[in-house]
Amino acid sequence: MSRSNLALWTAATAVTTAVVTATVIEAARYYFLSSGPKTPVARSKEFTDTVPNYSEELIREQLARNYVFLGEEGMKKVRDQFVVVVGAGGVGSNCVTALVRSGVSKVRIIDFDQVTLSSLNRHSVAIGRDVGTSKVDCLRRHLLQIAPWCEIEAINTLFNLENAESLLLKDSPTYVVDCIDNIDTKVDLLSFCHSKGIQVISSMGAACKSDSTRVNVADISASDEDPLARSVRRRLKKRGIINGIPCVFSSEKPDPRKASLLPLPDEEFEKGHVDQLSALQNFRVRILPVLGTMPAMFGLTIATYIVTTVSGYPVEPIEGKNRIKVYDGILQSLAGQQSRLGEKDQRVQISLSDVNYILEEVFRGKSPISGFSTRLALSRWKREEPLSLQNVVIMTKEEQKVHEDRVLLGGESLETVYPPAVLELVEKRFREEKYYSEFR
């Protein structure tokens, strides 16, 4: 093709693309906007129900970026999903909004609560005029303006085992999202889904959390540093469920300087029956401090997990920073050291989850001796003291051998082997661990 012909072809293609894009935009404007004869400013067209014959061309244009990202086959799977979201607060509202924006064609939203003024710091779509209305109706009303083609079922009721079948099995949903903040009800929902083989993902506690870098997706058996997850795990274990339920949780460690659930005033206890202060029986009485951004992150993480999982997009959630094998190797290095020190019992008082905590939280993922973060091992620090979280140190395998030969077996003092800066850093880490262990 000559340069002149190529230039003509390129120009023609550009014109064609511009015409098609302009046509789609104008069609969308025609569909969405209408104006009265006396009103110069266009107003949005109000959708009060699903539009079954909504233009496929407009849908595909609205989801164009998703189609480019996930591909034709992946987006077909996403659009075929029917997701039930139980709980329409900060986490649930952000999750279902993201799912609808991503192309999910059918959702069922379940919640008994109303939008309050304090909800506006974390709810995905609620505005001032929605205060006092049911959360599910608020979501349906706003989401229909985003995706008129989506079938949105809003059920203003409290989930329990008595209505579980009608809420979670009717019309065969493909996914259930648990965004409940009451432990007993949450466990009932998860147990029901597990027993029925329904795909479910659960949100753990976003309240009192503030570190976005600690948000994880993992099997519930691998969740740590989350009081709600711990309570849910214990209750599920009593029902014979140990794993098989993915969840979103924060591994942010507790700190007395951070927000926490404040105790009720003494005068409330003096009145007796504080449970009567709750809106519903067996639901929490006290208000949870919530940084509005964190529930949104939890909800968006769940939506991302569902969209990528069902579409077949290659994503590998990091469980415990994807270092389970590393943790196990580090733990085995400590057990091996016990044998070399002549200990008859190679069992150690350190668990696999403790290794995660020691490595990531106490020693910041690296040896305090060299600052290296590869080929790591765990070593007893002082020979005369028993193994504990305040007498084990992360170090490289080479450093472990030197430490054994000179300190643990050779009898040299720590002051002889290590410079003051290393000794001070290790002692500082031990003091921090002792401080935080009061709240773990």
Image: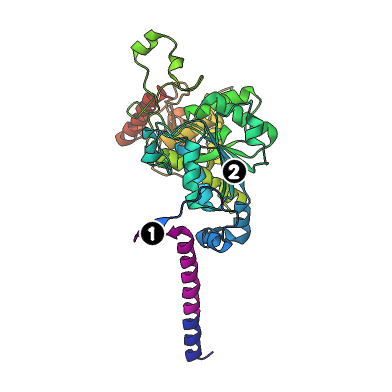
Viewer-closest of 39 and 371? 39
Q: Is residue 247 above or below residue 232?
A: below
The residue lying at 56 percent from left, 32 percent from top is 336
Question: How many neighbours does mark 2 have within 10 angstroms: few (below 14), some (14-19), or many (20 or more)?
Answer: many
Q: Position of residue 194 (x, y in %)?
A: 66, 33
Q: Quadrant of residue 430?
A: top left
Look at the image and tell me whether residue 230 can be seen. yes
Quadrant where the C terminus is found in the figure: top left
Q: Which residue is mark 1?
A: 42
Residue 8 colored magenta?
no
Q: Which residue is mark 2?
A: 83
Identified by mark 1, the residue type is: Ala
The range drawn in magenta is: 13-42
Identified by mark 2, the residue type is: Val
The residue lying at 67 percent from left, 36 percent from top is 169
Question: How many neighbours does mark 1 have within 10 angstroms: few (below 14), some (14-19), or many (20 or more)?
Answer: few
Viewer-closest of 29 and 122? 29
Q: Position of residue 43 (x, y in %)?
A: 40, 56
